[in-house]
Amino acid sequence: MKLLYSPASPYARKVLVLAHETGQADAITVQGATPSPTAGAPDVTAHNPLGKVPALILDDGSCLYDSRVICEFLDARSKGPRLFPEGEARWDALVRQALADGLLDAALITRYERVLRPEGLRWDAWDAGQIGKIEAALDRIEAVVADMPVLDIGTVAIACALGYLDYRYPDLAWREGRPATAAWYAVFEGRPSMTATEPPKG
């Protein structure tokens, strides 16, 4: 299998963390891609018409996207640990994954607004609204973190989201006023799956 990815993508990191945790990292070859929100990316759109990463090319040439689909596919084929629980616990894990992905959606489009959009066209109220969503998601994580299991797709997604905030939004200081989340992440970010998938420095 081949994973089209960007080393800075938190969604691609989520896939790779799950692959490590389920013992499948060696079954995946990673290939850097050049997606852009403003221009076509032929190396990606040839496989994913949305032009987004991650995209997983299977042995038969078919392609899976987005990160939620890829993670569930890899989990279903895992012969070891499973990160998508069954029964009632499944819905809790999926909601936490959705919470983390929603946080990332807001963080990514805010970065595009701040970095790619010409300064004179930026909309301060829109930026503030997205940061408000990030803050609300962080507050919700703080409220539930004590009851989270050690490892499932929800915890992986949350950890990758927090890692992205450290990577792209250090000035947000998300740990302030959220001691439980800060303590939880200090432990989780030390997992081998997380250290093996850290985004590039700089």
Image (spheres, rainbow, N blue to C red):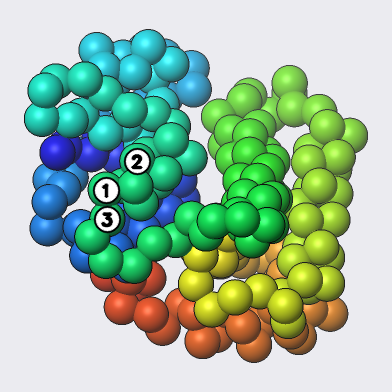
In this picture, is 105 found above or below 99? above
Q: What residue is drawn where x is 63% and y is 34%?
A: 109
**Amino acid marked by disc 1:** Arg
Q: What residue is drawn where x is 79% and y is 78%?
A: 178
Can you name the residue that lies furthest to the right here?
Answer: 125
In this picture, is 151 found above or below 53? below
Q: Which corner quadrant holds the C terminus?
A: bottom left
Circle 2 SS class: helix
Tell whether label 3 touches label 1 (CB within 8 Å): yes
| Structural distance between the alpha carbons of marks 3 and 2 | 9 Å
**Residue bearing the label numbered 2:** 73
In this picture, is 39 found above or below 169? above
**Residue bearing the label numbered 3:** 78
Q: Which corner quadrant holds the N terminus?
A: top left
Where does residue 195 sit, x and y in percent of width and height? 33, 74
Tell whether label 2 touches label 1 (CB within 8 Å): yes
Q: What residue is drawn where x is 73% and y is 81%?
A: 146
**Residue bearing the label numbered 1:** 77
Circle 3 SS class: loop
Report whether 121 appears left or right of 191. right
Where does residue 179 sit, x and y in percent of width and height? 76, 85
Q: Nearer the viewer, residue 147 or 32?
A: 147
Quarter assignment of residue 197 = bottom left
In this picture, is 121 found above or below 34? above
Quarter assignment of residue 183 = bottom right
Which mark is on residue 17? none
Q: What residue is drawn where x is 54% and y is 78%?
A: 150
| Structural distance between the alpha carbons of marks 1 and 3 | 4 Å
**Amino acid marked by disc 3:** Ser
**Amino acid marked by disc 2:** Phe
- Binning the other alpha carbons within 10 Å of mark 2 as few (below 14), some (14 to 19) or many (20 upward) gives few
Specify whether residue 27 is in view. yes
